[in-house]
Image (cartoon, rainbow, N blue to C red):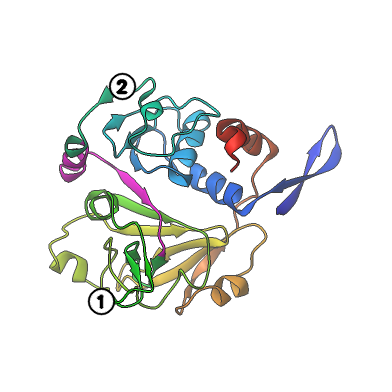
Amino acid sequence: MRGSVARASGRPVLVTFSATELLTVLTARSFEDGSRVFAGVGVPLVAAVLAKQRQARHLEIVVEGGVIDPVVKPGFLPISTNEVRIGRGATMLLGITDVFLLAQRGYLDRGIIGAAQIDRFGNVNTSVIGPVEHPIVRLPGSGGANDIASLCGRVSVVTTHERRRFVDRVDFITSPGWLRGGATRAEAGLAFGGVAEIITDLGRIVFDPSDRHAVLAAIHPGSTSDRVRKTTGFALDTAATLEHPAPPSADELSQLRELVGAAGA
């Protein structure tokens, strides 16, 4: 657990939060009102719903199973993109193919995906750990993540920050980031979009516009730049000015915990 000191009735109060709660709140703050986001279940969906309750009232959430703008009931978060409860109060229920066609036509401003491995050019692996021919671990695979990373206007990767996840080169490219850097993404036929950032419980990483290598842009509460580097398996440049976002407020945490309910954050 991490914590910060807030004030209630003029008295200091320790506000504690988990790494996942920190990650969720900071991701939620990054959503812009009026945008359309392709979000998977877990932290991406929880963060999007929290943002819609707070600063992004007109955020439009799109879910892979074909759901457009659901009304998620607090305490009843779906565990799958195809679960019935994800359709509650939705504006529209489409086929899964139609949702990806929306992305292909440029209608979705942002996509959010997770990662088992991610490298210095933002390529994501959720397929295998180890050699493809004889993997050490088999992972769930792409699902819709490859389409999201290939087609959405801006892509954010949301994950906990561990050295085993942040590797110099992923074992398999499930979802393309900037491939080998520079113009290689465009040369591969991916004409728009790209991984804009990696948001973790320790910091935020962006990509240099010239050659697309990773750059540390923010240090999150309870972390340090030294800790970020020690838990990253590739070299990180540092932005000229590092951001230091405020820790989750008691109000943000209260809303998050009500939303998540018994499942925990």
Q: Residue at x 17, y 59 (%)?
A: 190
Amino acid on which the number 2 mark rests in the picture: Thr
Q: Residue at x 35, y 38 (%)?
A: 81
Q: Position of residue 184 (x, y in %)?
A: 20, 71
* 110 relative position to 45: left or right: left
Q: Residue at x 21, y 43 (%)?
A: 103
Q: Quadrant of residue 259?
A: top right
* 257 relative position to 66: left or right: right
Question: Are there few (<14), some (14-19), or many (20+) residues within 10 Å of tag 1?
Answer: few
| Residue 32 on the magenta span | no
Looking at the image, which is closer to me, 3 or 84? 84
Asked if marks 2 and 1 touch (Cβ < 8 Å), the reply is no
Q: Position of residue 8 (x, y in %)?
A: 81, 35
Amino acid on which the number 1 mark rests in the picture: Glu
Q: Nearer the viewer, mark 2 or mark 1?
A: 1
Above or below 229: residue 252: above
| Residue 103 on the magenta span | yes
Q: Quadrant of residue 186?
A: bottom left
Which residue position holds label 1? 133
Mark number displayed over residue 53 = none
Write down the region rendered in magenta.
99-116
Q: Earlier in the sequence, mark 2 or mark 1?
A: 2
Looking at the image, which is closer to me, 54 or 174? 174
Could you give the CA–CA distance between mark 2 and mark 1, rounded to whole angstroms?
A: 44 Å
Above or below 45: residue 94: above
* 160 relative position to 144: left or right: right
Which residue position holds label 2? 91
Looking at the rendering, in which quadrant would you find the N terminus? bottom right
Q: Position of residue 73 (x, y in %)?
A: 49, 25
Q: Quadrant of residue 126?
A: bottom left
